[in-house]
Image: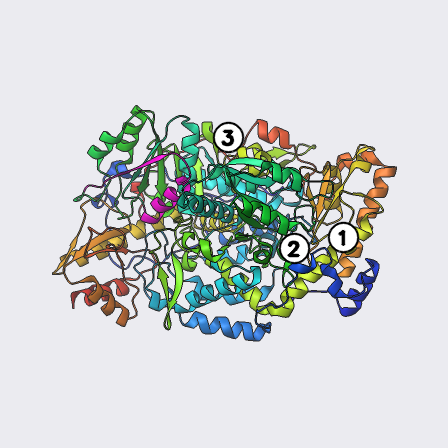
Amino acid sequence: MRPLLFEIGSTGRRGTSLPALEFPRKEVSSFLPFHLLRKNPPELPEVSELDVVRHYTSLSKKNFSVDANFYPLGSCTMKYNPKVNEDVVKQIGFLNLHPYQEEETVQGVLELLYNLEKILCEIVGVDEFCLQPAAGAQGEFTGLLIMHAYHSDRGNPRKKILVPDSSHGTNPASAALCGYEVIQVKSNARGRVDLDELRRLLDQNVAGMMLTNPNTLGLFEDEVSEIAKLVHEVEGLLYYDGANLNPLLGMARPGDMGFDIVHLNTHKTFSTPHGGGGPGAGPVGVKKFLSKYLPTPRIVQEKELFRIKHDFPKSVGKLTAFYGNTGVLLRAYAYIRSLGREGLLRTGQHAILNANYLLKGLKTFYEVAYPEMCMHEFVLTATRQKEKGVRALDIAKRLIDFGIHPPTIYFPLIVPEAMMIEPTETESRQTLDHFIEVMKTIAKEVEENPTLFRQAPMSAPVRRLDEVWAARHPVLKWEKKKRDEIPVASYSA
Amino acid sequence: MDYISNTPEDEKIMLDRISLRRMEDICQPIPEALRLKHFRVPSGLSELELKRLFLEKAKKNWNTAEHPSYLGAGSYDHFIPSVVEHIVGRSDFYTSYTPYQAEASQGMLQAIFEYQTMIAELTGLDVSNASLYDGASSSAEAVLMALSIQEGRRKVLVSKTVHPSYRRVIKTYLSAQSVELLEIPYDPLDGRTDLKALETLLVNDVACCVVQNPNFFGGIEEMAKIAEKLHAKGILLISVVYPISLGLLAPPGEYGADIACGEGQSLGNRSLFGGPYLGFFASRKEFVRKMPGRIVGQTHDEKGKRGFVLTLQTREQHIRREKATSNICTNEGLCALTTSVYLATLGKSGVQEIADQNLQKSHYLSQRISKLHGYRLRFRAPFFNEFVIETQKGTSLLEKRLHQRGILGPLPLQEFYPELKGCLLFCVTETRTKGELDELVKVLGL
């Protein structure tokens, strides 16, 4: 492996310079008493600009990415991130805007964000959107706070949230953060919400239900209208987890299915780069009767002027310090405007087409958890391979040797040895054929040489890493053995 | 323009393979009644049209590269060396995702491990996570973590000198929980947390106390004294810090903070109208299993070679579901990478020099303004790079005058603190020149 930044460089070396002060410098002690100052300077790297460039360039080569690899990571929608979206946002007219500038000086950005809200309303079929939540999980939390506020206004916040047993882990975690008891609804033999079970669980203490559609098995919840009816009968609300919105684009809308609250993941559906784990954005949309609860501030249009309005007494409050992840949201808007009506529809269609084409090509070699037409993704189960001693994890690691990012594994939790595969619409038929060939080769290796898998991956910068050791002996930072005691206040420029 | 690679010919072959006749049949799994009839989104734009649209809107905004800005208050205009954005723009980083598969993600994992080391070093605390959303939400997560550590204690103290938006976010995060949130007033002359008032609030069931340093008014709090008072009652100190100041000011670990968090934007990230930013988060090591968010740990492969993995994952939602320490999943990986490249480039001496220049320039300006007729420093506490000026001139008149000269003036405080009528929060970073500062003084003196 590459040495750590702290292990290279030498004393006094630095990677940048500042202009000299244009007036006489005064001693720090003339401004600040000594006890407020740092005693030891922070032990940061001492490297040149070239050291920095070589270091990070080397690291970047030890990373799979959409730009370099097929990345069928289920439920994460790792589609191609168009370059023009980077270019249109990376201009000083957006990059260098302070969030507290006067409204007159930020009309351009306010207009784009306002229009993004409007276009999202049309795409998902709701009445109002708020862009503030910084990621999907924060969007979920916001949506549940809205639910909580709505029920509280009606006299009883209620106690329970229903989530399917196939739901994303963030659903129960967000509900718990909102003080709700989480009740799991079992899936039926078809991999959908079991309506009998749902009827049994619904009562006046249920605040609402969170649902992903298509669900995490890649199946459309075809009884969603009935689910909405049942939840609404007990005056609960239906929440849409937007992680899997991609295959519905232009074809169906959560708002029309009876969902009251929706969150989206711009880094999934709307192609904003995943950034090695963020930043994302998790806009939240609601039906009219809930709009007064949306987070504050809101962008409103008054005559020709876009304004940032704070005064919403029923609002659930604030989730981030300012207006959310503007840079990410602008990329999402650029993407939506590029695609337009036809492109959005084609995106949804090709997401489904690609997934079904893969499913068809793979089902001879692997068991399919729910063998029927899927939406944007499907789940394989490595039960046949497990009999040979090869687990989903081993297959995942072996895929790395073929230059393919592994699928999501061991999720959803209701499928043993799950491998969840989402190709996305941007991959070509040739890439999909290649993946099928690789998976076929791997299936054959399982039959012929199962012990090989214990060594996989063999071509990565490291062999299989010991995760158990890491958790038992946490080493969470690099540590220097000794340090000198030099008061920072003695520093002179 | 869409980004679909398959041609109509591919489409035909593929449809055939899955036994569908036409593309329209692809929506088969969706019940007929739910299929969309009218989709009212405009037609797509070509790349050239899109660029024109965004350029036109960008031009309508005043940017801080061309308009000298005196705005701070949680988002700062600092110098960003070119190398930072070149590195972060490498798509091997920005088009990857959460490093679940460690062997295919060693680059990002090592970069985050180095980030954690730098944050621990800057804050003087034992462990850092891989980042949260922003300063405000990381403060709220810190409060939740403290409540979980201090089981049974259900009161939370927050100083009124903490950023008003952060206080609002903390309130929002706690709104569905049975927790009492109490605000500590500030000393009206000093502009810092009122220590006498604090003492009266230190009752037994207080879990934690949130103090910002430098505080919202720029004042440097007596953190060591506060820590001592809190710890005597078993209360945890959450210190919300401005990381640029840590090149100079005592770090949270030195004065006994239990958790340090804050806004990492100032470390190499653009102001970008409020985001994406990153919340950094560090604590004492005994609390690590209660920490929210991803954490990268060092380990080794079967040949003994060093490597890095996401670790202590049993805290997290994808494993623990409703029992997780937080609901966070996607964090701000790329912004954390930005921060590490920035800190590496500045290095040990650079962070000290930046902090020193901020101190020097803000004091140069504050001394000159407070000599003007009709202006005075509102608070007498020592400050870092932000300070409050009170004026009798009428803030809207001043705003107008600065606006006419293309200057992004200071932040009027009345909206946040009704009692601070006529008060303006100035921020001066290393990016302001002496010429700009002198010009500002001239305009204020008119």
Q: Position of residue A57 (x, y in %)?
A: 59, 52
Image: magenta residue range: B163-187
Question: Comparing marks 1 and 2, which lies closer to the viewer?
Answer: 1
Q: Is residue A7 visible?
A: no
Taking A431 as reference, is A292 left or right? left
Are the residues flagged by discs 1 and 2 in contact, CB closer than 8 Å? no
Quadrant of the rendering where the C terminus of chain B is positioned: bottom left
**Does the stretch in magenta take in B165?**
yes
Instruction: Give the numbered dot on residue A66.
Output: 2
Q: Position of residue A49 (x, y in %)?
A: 49, 53
Q: Chain of mark 2?
A: A
Q: Gap in Å between the C-alphas at discs 1 and 2?
A: 26 Å
Q: Is residue B281 visible?
A: yes
**Does the stretch in magenta take in A228?**
no
The residue that label 1 is drawn on is: A373
Element type at mark 2: loop
Amino acid type at image mark 3:
Arg
Tell me which residue sits at (87%, 38%) in the image: A447
The residue that label 3 is drawn on is: B289
Front residue (pair A14, A256): A256
Front residue (pair A168, B225): A168
Question: Comparing marks 1 and 3, which lies closer to the viewer?
Answer: 1
Q: Gap in Å between the C-alphas at discs 1 and 3?
A: 42 Å
- Rate crowding at label 1 as few (under 14), some (14 to 19) or many (20 or more) other CA atoms within 10 Å: many
Tell me which residue sits at (40%, 39%) in the image: B174
Kindly indicate whether the residues beneath marks 1 and 3 are on one polypeptide chain: no
Q: Position of residue A377 (x, y in %)?
A: 70, 51
Element type at mark 3: helix
